[in-house]
Image (cartoon, grey):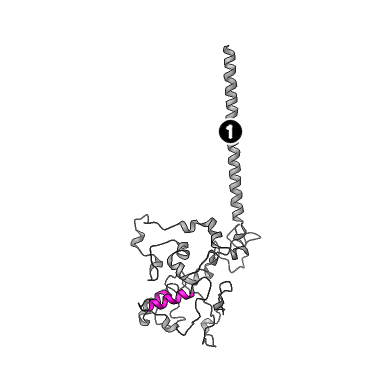
């Protein structure tokens, strides 16, 4: 009888061990399948047609944010590790009167803040026009951008010279505008009003799809009475400069435009980029 009991115990243990092993094998197989499926999803997402032309040219913000929604979820820290509170300090983009509200993240300032919604019509594809998913360096593979591609910027997912510089270049106070000093020093001479001169000069302004032209002009006029009209303009024309150079704005024709092109504008384009031109600006 004792022998039979031991045989039964051994059989139970063997069956249990087999069941445990089978369960472990099944869990490992499921984990391998999950990892493979995750890798497959990542690969399919990485090589989505939306990351390449021509599909990216018509991609909507909703399509982009379906995978990249974290760019709008991220917000600055309430306080830096050193203890400085954001509410007690002005960021570089808060230096003019046109920016209202607390500090905010890069993408939120360009897409969802009140100022962005009022004055801009920026979309994800305004700046992002696809990238080489294999390598962000020129000439690294047979399919990567060639070394001769002037529109490519090493390790950048956008070309700053054709995107960021549009609104974050220096204000050419002396070189082009002929002002006696930088705008922050000379603005009081002009009652901090750009429209005083630009009522007749370069009057075809902001006629591009990524800006709300009418709202910008209205904001500048309304702020002029408070002697803050120049701040509306200066905010994007030198007040938040990232670069030492000014952006070479296109010379879209305006009524009364002189026939003779000044020397400094000789190489300027005669119209804004075609993908951004609105009907009013053609």
The secondary structure that most of the magenta stretch takes on is helix
* Side (left or right) of 233 relative to 132: left
Residue range in magenta is 213-233
Between 62 and 37, the one lying in front of the other is 62
Report whether residue 182 is seen.
no
Task: Name the residue: 57% across, 23% down.
Answer: 13
Quarter residue 145 falls in: bottom right
Residue found at the far right of this picture: 142
The quadrant the C terminus occupies is bottom right
* Side (left or right) of 163 relative to 82: right
- Residue 234 at what x, y percent from top left? 42, 75
Quarter residue 139 falls in: bottom right
Between 49 and 153, the one lying in front of the other is 49
Report whether residue 41 is seen.
yes
- Residue 162 at what x, y percent from top left? 54, 70
Task: Name the residue: 58% across, 44% down.
Answer: 35
Check if residue 100 falls in the magenta segment.
Answer: no
**Residue topped by disc 1:** 23
- Residue 202 at what x, y percent from top left? 49, 82
């Amino acid at each position: 009888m004792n022998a039979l009991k031991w045989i039964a115990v051994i059989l139970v243990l063997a069956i249990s061990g087999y069941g445990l092993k089978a369960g472990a094998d099944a869990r490992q197989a499921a984990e391998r399948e999950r990892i493979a499926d995750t890798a497959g999803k990542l690969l399919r997402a990485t090589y989505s047609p939306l990351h390449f032309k021509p599909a990216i040219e018509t991609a909507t913000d909703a399509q982009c944010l379906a995978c990249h929604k974290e760019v709008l979820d991220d917000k600055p820290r309430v306080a830096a590790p050193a203890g400085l509170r954001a509410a007690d300090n002005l960021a570089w983009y808060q230096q003019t009167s046109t920016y209202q509200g607390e500090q905010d993240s890069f993408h939120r300032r360009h897409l969802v803040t009140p100022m962005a919604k009022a004055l801009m019509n920026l979309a994800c594809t305004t700046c992002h026009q696809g990238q080489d998913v294999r390598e962000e360096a020129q000439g690294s593979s047979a399919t990567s951008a060639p070394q001769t591609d002037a529109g490519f910027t090493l390790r950048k997912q956008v070309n700053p010279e054709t995107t960021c510089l549009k609104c974050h270049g220096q204000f050419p106070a002396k070189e082009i505008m002929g002002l006696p000093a930088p705008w922050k020093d000379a603005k009081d001479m002009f009652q901090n009003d750009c429209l005083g001169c630009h009522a007749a000069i370069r009057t075809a302004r902001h006629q591009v799809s990524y800006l709300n032209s009418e709202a910008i002009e209205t904001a500048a006029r309304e702020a002029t009475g408070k002697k803050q009209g120049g701040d509306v303009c200066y905010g994007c024309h030198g007040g938040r400069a990232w670069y030492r150079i000014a952006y070479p704005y296109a010379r879209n024709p305006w009524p009364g435009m002189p026939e003779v092109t000044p020397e400094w504008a000789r190489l300027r384009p005669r119209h804004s980029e075609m993908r951004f031109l609105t009907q009013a600006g053609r």
